[in-house]
Amino acid sequence: MKHAQWFKRILLPGLVFQSVVIAGGYGTGREIAEFFLTHGPLGGLLAMLLVSTVIWSVVNAASFEFARVFSSYDYRRFFKTLLGPGWVLFEICYIAFLAIVLAVIAAAAGTMLRETFDLPYAVGVIGVTAAVGFLVFRGSSTIENALTGWSVVLYGTYLVFFVWSFVRFGGEIGTALAGDRPGLDWILGGVRYAGYNLAVIPAVLFTVRHARSRRDAVTAGLLAGPIAIIPGLLFYLIMVAQYPAILDRPVPANTLLELLGSRAFHVIFQIVLLGTLIETGTGLIHAVNERIASVYEEGGHAMPRLLRPVVGVALLLVAAGLSRFGLIDLIAKGYGTLTWLFLAVFVVPILSVGIWKILRRPTAPVAMGVVD
């Protein structure tokens, strides 16, 4: 029991953060190509490790402690406490981000099933919608278990993918890294990548209810960065071996799997990746449901359980319409614009006003545990 409690307090937030980040962060490999590999093999590696990971850890640590101190476990309460009346600015940005990420998920699911199993594009979209609807209907406890369990599966699959690819292409990886002479533009690339992905933190706040102290919250936040970036790092190194040709592929993961030449592993990887798309969609939509539930609670009522999947399905249907723009345009244009908005309405405030408010109120309430 003690180990289970430690896991929930320290590791669970990072694993859920990784689960929610992956589909919009590096699931298909397109995001890695856009924000990192365009700066060259070594430049991209530096951006990933020295910039994005550090920013993720610092902002998660501050956000988790802020949520614990002020018992703000949904983004409405969190940003009303942080920004006052300006909290609505974050909600506008979050809904825009949600629409784009869900569109990426729908587009990726449809493309993956069509390319791997020769199924109609709509099958992927409908399948993801149904799975997300089921999970958000079940609530927080089920979502925690599903996201954590699938993260373990994901880590194992990416490790196999990396080792196998390294055996085949290790020489090319070393040559590409050694031959790169990056400038300093990789710093901006790391900031841009970290900026838009930090928008998923509100989808993780419900797990911070387990934290019992400042040490718990801050430790969980600092670990969230490395936990979330490690699978992306393994994926990036594999992509480096195919640089620069890989930059033009809409779904680089498919290209790399084809090069390995194993149909069985290709299918397994796509199933795991499909699960990560469901993870991300579930986490982001759950944050919206928790925000709606907080309004019901303030009115002395409980949010109708059936409303949860209705909200999820409605959001996914809107995203399905946006998915027609394609992965490359959605990621390059949509994410790039939102990066600066989230830096302005979230990252800068939490690292300035947020920390100031935390220090003014050092004695925090004890978390009461997750309510399903």
Image (cartoon, helix red, strand yellow):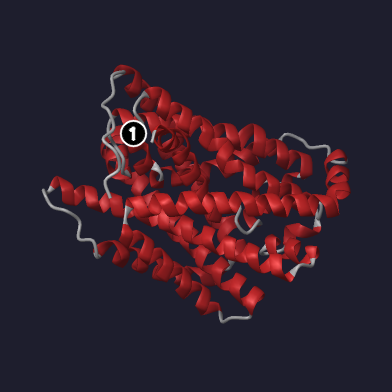
Q: Residue furthest left?
A: 300
355 and 157: which one is in front?
157
Could one spot residue 173 in this view of the protein? Answer: yes
* Residue at figure coordinates x 29%, y 50% from the top left: 290
Q: Eyeballing the image, is 181 above or below 361? A: below
Left or right of residue 182: residue 293: left
Residue 29 lies in quadrant: bottom right
Quick check: 158 left or right of 324?
Answer: right
Quarter holding residue 205: top left
Q: Which residue is mark 1?
A: 67
Q: Is residue 329 left or right of residue 355?
A: right
As displayed, is residue 38 above or below residue 103? above
Residue 338 placement (x, y as % from top left): 49, 49
The residue positioned 71% from the left and 54% from the top of the image is 161
Front-lying residue, 219 or 41: 219
Q: Residues within 10 Å of mark 1 (few under 14, many from 20)?
A: many
Residue located 63% across and 51% down the image: 156
Give coordinates of residue 213: x percent, y percent.
Answer: 36, 24
Q: Position of residue 225 (x, y in %)?
A: 55, 36
Confirm whether residue 335 shows in the render: no
Q: Is residue 200 above or below residue 271?
A: above
Q: Position of residue 282 (x, y in %)?
A: 41, 58
